[in-house]
Each structure stands twice: as C-alpha cells, then as structure tokens.
Amino acid sequence: MTETADPVSPTAPSGHVPSPGAGWRPFVVAERRDESPQVTSFLLRPVDGAPLPPHRAGQHLTLRLERPGSAPLVRDYTISCAPNGDHWRISVKREPKGAASNWLHDHLPVGQHLEVRAPSGDFVLPDEATRPVVMVSAGVGITPMIAMLEAAVAAGDARPIHFVHGTRDRATHAFADHVAALAGRHAGAIRLDVFYSRPRPEDGAGPDGTHAGRIGLDWLRAETPLREASYLLCGPLDFLRDMANGLASAGVPRSRIRFEFFGAAEDIFDDGAAAAPLSRPATAPLPVATDETMAIEEQVGRALVASPADGVVASDRDGTITVWNAGAERIFGFSPAEALGQSLDIIIPEPFRARHWEGYHQTVATGESRYGAGDLLAVPGLCKDGRRISIEFTIVLMKDGSGRVSGMVSSVRDVSRRFEETKALKKRVAELEKATGAA
Ligand SMILES: Cc1cc2nc3c(=O)[nH]c(=O)nc-3n(C[C@H](O)[C@H](O)[C@H](O)COP(=O)(O)OP(=O)(O)OC[C@H]3O[C@@H](n4cnc5c(N)ncnc54)[C@H](O)[C@@H]3O)c2cc1C
C-alpha cells in the first residue's frame, strides 16, 4: 500500500514543534508504503526544498519525534534507498511495545513533519571494486542491503554480489519483489538466496534460491567465496554473533567482515525486560535546596559511592573514568587505581565500542540523551579477567553552570545470572514446543 503527498506543497502539520536547533532539519513525509505487515517505508523530503546532503548507501539517519505531552524520542533508521538527490526513505519494523516504531507507524501520516539529522555511519559498500560482496541479513536488517543493492545496480557495479536474506515466511518478506527486480536488471552479477524459517505451504522451497530453514554457516561455507569475499551482515544480535564468529572461525579475516547492529535491547536480553520502558516519567520540579537537604544529598552521594551494592561509574566529556566505586570494582574487577583515568573502553567489549562512542559523543554535544529519563539500558560488559557479563544501567547527565554537559554517571548492575537463566528457559520451551509440535 502506498500513500503519496504533494511534494510541492506539503500539508501543514498539526502540532508541529519548531526545529530544536543546530543539526536538525525539518522533513515531510511525502509517501508511505507497507513493505510487509510489520515494515512500513516512509519517503522523506526536506521541507525547505534545498538539496539533500550527500550520503553513502548503507548509512543511517537520526530522527527526532515530537510527541505532544511526552519527551521527544530520538532513534536511528537506515536510509533504505540509494542516494538519489531527491528524497530519503526509511523502512521501519513495528516492534512490539516499541515506543518510536509504533509512533512512526501510527502517528506519521503523509504530510506530517519531523526533525532529521544528516546521514552518518560507516556500514557501506567496501571500496574494493572487484572483490565479491556477500550481503547477509535477517528481518529488518535488510534495509541497508536494499540501499547498497540499489546503489550497485544504479552504478553498474561489476563485482559479483550475493544477496542472502532470512525471514519467517513470504508474508513477512519485505522488499521481495523489489530485490528480485533489481537482480533482474543486473542479471549475472547478482545471486539471490532467501531463507524462510517457518515457510507456509504456499511459500515453497526450490531451486530458485528459496530455502526452508535459517541461514546456516555450513551453507555459507559451501555457497559463498570465503577466500575472497567481503561479508556485510545486519540483523538481530544472536544472528550477528553466529554469523560473524562462524565466518571468522572459517578463516574469513575480520577486515572482510562488516556488520551493522540495530541495537534493540531485547536482542540482547531474551525476556525484553531490560529494554527501554515505554513511558518516561514526567520531570517533576526539584524541591528548593536548603542547607539541610544539601547536606543530606551529599551524605547520600558519599554512601552510594562507598557502597559495593550498585556500581557507580562517572566519566568526563571524553569518556575518561572520573568516579569508580566499590560496586564497580566488585562487578568488573578493576580497582579504583586501575580504572580511574582510563577510557570507558576497559569495560566495553570491542564490537560495541563504535556504537557506544557514537551515542556518547552525540549526547555530550547535544546535551540530550534518549536514555536520560531513567530508562534501563542492557548491554554486554567486559571484566578485568576478560569475561563478558550482562549489565543493566541507567545514565544521568552532569551539566555545568552554563548547561553544558560535563560528564555522565551510571548506576550499573550485573544481571548475567538472570540472562543465562532466561536463555536456558527459552531454549527449553522451544525444545518442548518442537517435541510436542506446538511451534
Ligand atoms: C544504525 C541503526 C540503524 C537502524 N535502522 C533501522 C531500520 O532501518 N529499521 C528499523 O525498523 N529499525 C532500525 N533501527 C532500530 C531503531 O533505531 C529502533 O531501535 C527500533 O525501531 C526500536 O525502537 P522503539 O522505540 O520502537 O523501541 P524501544 O521503545 O526503544 O524498545 C526496544 C524494544 O524493547 C522492547 N520493550 C520496550 N519497552 C518494553 C517493556 N516495557 N517491556 C518489555 N519490552 C519492552 C520492545 O519490544 C522493543 O522492541 C536502527 C538502529 C540503529 C542503531
């Protein structure tokens, strides 16, 4: 289903909030299109009609969604079309209970305005023009691959491209016809393979590149040129872990494995309980500080920093650790002497660092954190002995007298045991469902 707006005179939005400042630019929804029951595309054009900044296929936009009576939401969405000088397109999967994705689906009709930041990100087609590329995606992870495939076809890219995608069935297969048409236009250079994990009888599996089941490493080993290809991966965290580790252990050098992670917390925690809460608490005015209340607050601060209960970790604008309490030492194993003055990198596993710093520096620069209202974040953490643990934490921004961000402080808990228990339970339920035919 496609809806189209008059691009010349976009309808005035109801309740539009003026641009919140530098870096954000108003765009109008010029068209909407349902790609599948869960995924809807939004075609965006700049309200001022001025040219779009250049971007590379695979990069993403940051959107700011103003919701009357609620805090704005800031989220990243890949540009799901090739650079064309006219518009950007995003394709959003409706996440169960997801705040922004549901808002976009339900409250962003054609003609509505929204604030958008310029494209960023380094998940793009590799520059080596002759090396084969294997794009492997699952679910809505198809969006950057669509942009790159469109760009390759438009440029007459001569390198062999193998497009491998996994989804539940033909009904959830967004962009199926579009990808087939692109491959048809570039016959010979593009190979398509689709995996349906739960195909319906009418979906069929056959010699035309449609397979039943999930994308497997054995299949990738047998069907793709491991010795020479670059691999581009995008999908849920478990999928990325399986694919990236499997390819690396099959001998593909890491320099030839690139991935994009969409970062939903439920991809890390199977029970979703660690994901961002749906509604943010309204900011109540602070009570007026008296000498007595300030003294008590200082005591509370000192008690929390001295306690081994929760980890308290503060860092400056650059991400250098400035406070490291007994709880942080208990959780991560680094003593204050070892942690103070170090980068937060010491507790962030390598694959998560780029994404972390992108968000960190943006928060420092803008003074806005999408997690600043008490939302719980869930990520893997790294201990002194190299162990990976599962942590949950909240963030508080620290600001100086002029309102500039001076650093951040986090309250951290180790939830590894619950994470493992939930994973084991999920596995057991899946086995039982399989055994009883309930799946
Ligand atoms: C670089 C990049 C590119 C991206 N590109 C795309 C793209 O092309 N398309 C796309 O669809 N997404 C994309 N994303 C993901 C997108 O930014 C959002 O994370 C996604 O839409 C979910 O946001 P949300 O506000 O709807 O969910 P959130 O409210 O942030 O919640 C995240 C998840 O937690 C769960 N959850 C939330 N609250 C609760 C609760 N109280 N109890 C239990 N579970 C809960 C929800 O199920 C939800 O799925 C991209 C992300 C990045 C970083």
Image (cartoon, rainbow, N blue to C red):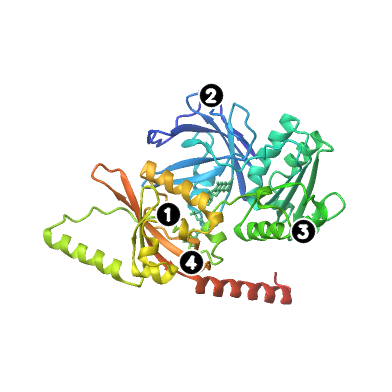
Q: Nearer the viewer, mark 3 or mark 2?
A: 2
Label 4: element kind: loop
Relative to 422, residue 113 above or below: above
Q: Where is residue 323 drawn, in percent x and y?
A: 33, 60
* Residue 310 lies in quadrant: bottom left
Q: CA distance from mark 1 to mark 3?
A: 50 Å
Q: If you read the primary sequence from the N terminus, does the residue marked by circle 1 or circle 2 appear first?
A: 2
Q: If you read the primary sequence from the N terminus, does the residue marked by circle 4 or circle 3 appear first?
A: 3
The disc placed on residue 51 is 2
Q: Amino acid at mark 4?
A: Cys
Within-10-Å neighbours for mark 4: few <14, some 14–19, many 20+: some
Q: Amino acid at mark 3?
A: Arg
C-beta proximity under 8 Å, tags 4 and 3: no
C-beta proximity under 8 Å, tags 1 and 2: no
Q: CA distance from mark 4 to mark 2?
A: 47 Å
Q: CA distance from mark 4 to mark 3?
A: 45 Å
Within-10-Å neighbours for mark 1: few <14, some 14–19, many 20+: some
Q: Where is residue 185 drawn, in percent x and y?
A: 80, 33
Label 2: element kind: loop
Q: Amino acid at mark 2?
A: Pro
Q: Nearer the viewer, residue 104 or 26?
A: 26
Q: Which residue is mark 4?
A: 383
Q: If you read the primary sequence from the N terminus, does the residue marked by circle 4 or circle 1 appear first?
A: 1
Q: Where is residue 37 drawn, in percent x and y?
A: 64, 50
Q: Is residue 24 visible?
A: yes
Q: Is residue 366 left or right of residue 386?
A: left
Q: Which residue is mark 3?
A: 200
* Residue 188 lies in quadrant: top right
Q: CA distance from mark 3 to mark 2?
A: 45 Å
Q: Amino acid at mark 1?
A: Ser
